[in-house]
Amino acid sequence: MQPREQTPVGVDLNADVGEGFGRWSLGDDAAILATVTSANVACGFHAGDPATMATTVQTARERGVAIGAHVSYRDLAGFGRRYLDADEEELTGDVLYQLGALAGIARSLGAEIAYVKPHGALYNTIAVDDERGQRHARAVLTAIARYDPALPVVGLAGTRYLDRIREAGLTPVAEAFADRAYTPSGALVSRREPGAVLHDPDLVAERMVTMVRTGTVPAVDGSLVEVQAQSICVHGDSPGAVTMAQAVRTALEGAGVTVRAFTTEPQPSSSAAGNG
Amino acid sequence: MQPREQTPVGVDLNADVGEGFGRWSLGDDAAILATVTSANVACGFHAGDPATMATTVQTARERGVAIGAHVSYRDLAGFGRRYLDADEEELTGDVLYQLGALAGIARSLGAEIAYVKPHGALYNTIAVDDERGQRHARAVLTAIARYDPALPVVGLAGTRYLDRIREAGLTPVAEAFADRAYTPSGALVSRREPGAVLHDPDLVAERMVTMVRTGTVPAVDGSLVEVQAQSICVHGDSPGAVTMAQAVRTALEGAGVTVRAFTTEPQPSSSAAGNG
Amino acid sequence: MQPREQTPVGVDLNADVGEGFGRWSLGDDAAILATVTSANVACGFHAGDPATMATTVQTARERGVAIGAHVSYRDLAGFGRRYLDADEEELTGDVLYQLGALAGIARSLGAEIAYVKPHGALYNTIAVDDERGQRHARAVLTAIARYDPALPVVGLAGTRYLDRIREAGLTPVAEAFADRAYTPSGALVSRREPGAVLHDPDLVAERMVTMVRTGTVPAVDGSLVEVQAQSICVHGDSPGAVTMAQAVRTALEGAGVTVRAFTTEPQPSSSAAGNG
Amino acid sequence: MQPREQTPVGVDLNADVGEGFGRWSLGDDAAILATVTSANVACGFHAGDPATMATTVQTARERGVAIGAHVSYRDLAGFGRRYLDADEEELTGDVLYQLGALAGIARSLGAEIAYVKPHGALYNTIAVDDERGQRHARAVLTAIARYDPALPVVGLAGTRYLDRIREAGLTPVAEAFADRAYTPSGALVSRREPGAVLHDPDLVAERMVTMVRTGTVPAVDGSLVEVQAQSICVHGDSPGAVTMAQAVRTALEGAGVTVRAFTTEPQPSSSAAGNG
């Protein structure tokens, strides 16, 4: 397809934080929270004990970073990275429980949840529009709609799931992954394939500038693929993660892109984005 | 002391509910919720998976029963009945997490948390005014004060803890235990002593009518001991629990006592009660 | 097919026991352990705290009931009834952990594990010979082979999984389900279908006598289907479970069938059985 | 007291390993296992998922390091560092469960548990000879005696607990802490006091050489205090832990002390040690 030049109004950077549990910590949250504009805060089901959640919310709040509920399957031992065949009502309950728990901690600190992003296997499951993906998407969206329909929901750019979010009366936020390769059809290259994860901060940063400017990224076969995203996910827990996040932010700002939370985005431009 | 005749304005009946977890259930919640006026809902740390919590809140709401957060130490294996030496910040986080989780589920059903009652070992720990009791009382009360200082907190009638609640800027609700024997000084007879638990529904009902009318109950030595309580705890998970709860309610109503949630109590009379 | 008259040498009755956790109990273990010859003891991952495990092992031992390790996915909240996409190495570790834990408790009581039976969703997953069924079967069988290759493994009669057990150098034990309807091809009718579960103790008992005598049971369409099983699973946690288990045992013994643990079965007949 | 010159036959170095859980890791186990002679392996209750346990046992085995069961209160969120008021029977079950679980994993790798060392709050609780210390000591020792009375049990040098071990028919192993200051009476200085933890590797190493040679260490007041230990605990999870462990080993070997597992110690000298 033909890349479209557009005025880069801005983009959000999001990362997973608060992914310790009790004695264990993970990643450099302080450095990440100094770089991103939205923080996906673990809610206790894959990571995140209450004291860690409180510290994370407090730091995010001090830095003006939007707080998202990073809801997960109940699976501490698997870090929420394993599909769990929960039935719909159970999963709706689990999501409500996590949303409320984070909201309770945020409230005690004068902060609020600004959005929801499913984590790990739950994220991947609902990005696929098959029976179980639809079932778990319904469970998650029912929970959010009942809890607070004003909460935006982050999902993979280009997926049918973003439509499901709209159909549930909720606001989708399309996101791209900074360090992941894309297929010509706009899907992420599976992590089992070579080249699925990009490690060069400069290349990653350049791709994201291109993505924001043109709504496209180069796919693995060299073609341009449409990826229209309001938010870019940078990772926080791998070696070099902070460096890459900073490189992406610096490159975006150097290209005149405003990096700011999507929750602060002017609403008209919001409705124009999503999975085109 | 001299029993004081007073106009019985009314009293609350509370019971523990929602104490199943996943496949496991406990007690006859439907029958208990048809009898009491306040429901202590387990929040997931000693019992209460999210789906059970939702069902419990829904039933309580339909019956007009006030919903309380039954917060606990994190101890599913021990049902929250074992002292856990959490540090103050951890425990504050754990209480906030549970409050928020229940509030999230309640919110999804158009309901709200009306009060807080610590569960099991946590309840017993903070009823004693020693170093660890004070430490854990501070942790609990800090959590509630930060979350919502308008939430009343249930505690054992006659304890110093009720003053701690007031000192934290919160509203204490003094409670009596229907089926427990009292020492002459107003403490509960330890469960390790013979006669600590009363099993005769008629006797228990009569004692509670006396307590509401006169602010006293007969102690184990036959003397009268002052027990001024706005709420009476009836148990829900033992054999005969429902029968006893019904007997207490019937006797109270037969004696002209209004049985209603303390959360609906006229405020002036509230400030007059507590541990005298 | 043509039913084959054979001398009924005997059959085993197995049931799930020890499925409480902490404060929660499930089923009437004492009555079930008085009826069956093999006890599938929960190992802590779907149910079964250590004190419950000890009590269960002790009762089984006193009654001469063989002790099996009822290993599960790690899922207390779901009672092991939800598929969990564990990777092979994780699942091998989880099975070894549970085997060892039960063996440790058994050893302290002078008892031993006599066999292994996967529980719930794990059982159902490996009964299907697809990619994930094969993967999780490999994980389970690798664990058992490394732990003790002399331990027999219980699996659904007629499945390819029984061959997988043999291929892993282990001994399969084919089992039938007393209260389940069978398709003409020998599979269990899905619980989502009407008539999947049989509730009439007399009918169930008669079918099991037929199964032991002829190696067949009537399928849902009236045809006879081959079900050659060395063990019959009776359930322990549903209403009427004990009555049904007793009816099956009484009918079998009335028909001259010896009811005894498969672990005490003469070995030559063992090799002739399995999924024919 | 007068320091006693003795022929240094040897000493054991032990450290905590395998203290990750799922996605989380802790400390540099490979480096620690290259330095110590006994490895306290977490058994899943404070840390240590089964796959981590397997990896840890395998590495220990390859390096000829003795494998100990590092049993804990059930408290993942608190890393086993919080007192939990388990009753005696529960705790006996919990210890048996953990012993068996580690033994199962070890067995699958051709390895065996060589000793038991309680972890964290459980260790500290039973080092104090009060009601709860005695109760939990009984629970732990009952579990070990029933499981395998030949397993030695590690405890703090100089405590009454070492006698309790002997009285239970088990073999005590007295241990010293390399990086902790001692009071004149031989207790560890509380971590709440300044100077409780020593950070200088050279000083720590020198103290341990003195301890092995003379059976004494300098207390905080400069006096010499008797500390007769067969094993020295070095920590594995703090910054500089590996450096300090290596410094201790190097200094001991430089002083002619043989560093070897206490499980390989000649038995006559074993009986002479303990809390003098």
Image: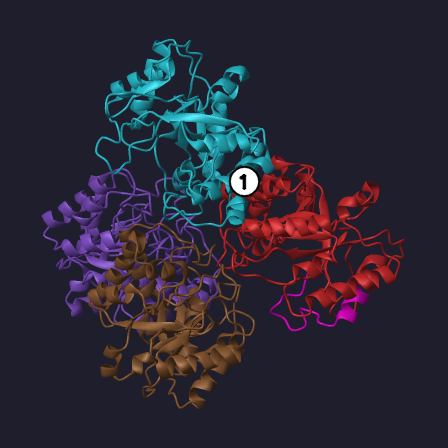
Chain colours: A cyan, B red, C brown, D purple
Tell how many labels: 1
Principal secondary structure, stretch drawn in magenta: loop
The foreground one among B165 and B43 is B43
Asked whether C265 or D124 is in front, the reply is C265
Q: Is residue D89 left or right of residue B171?
A: left
Q: In this image, C276 relative to A147: left or right?
A: left
Taking the image as shown, residue D103 lies to the left or right of residue A95, namely left
Q: Is residue A62 visible?
A: yes
From this view, report whether residue D132 is shown above or below residue A205. Answer: below
Q: Is residue B179 above or below residue B107?
A: below
Q: Tell me if residue B189 is in the magenta stretch.
A: yes
Seen in the picture, residue C180 relative to D53 is either above or below; the reply is below
What is the quadrant of residue D194 in the picture? top left
Q: Position of residue B126 (x, y in %)?
A: 60, 51
Tell me the amino acid under the disc marked 1.
Ala
Question: Dot 1: few (<14), some (14–19), or many (≥20) neighbours within 10 Å?
Answer: many
Q: Position of residue A19 (x, y in %)?
A: 40, 37
Which residue corresponds to mark 1?
A: A101
Depth order, front residue of A202/C118: C118
Q: Residue at x 51, y 29 (%)?
A: A115
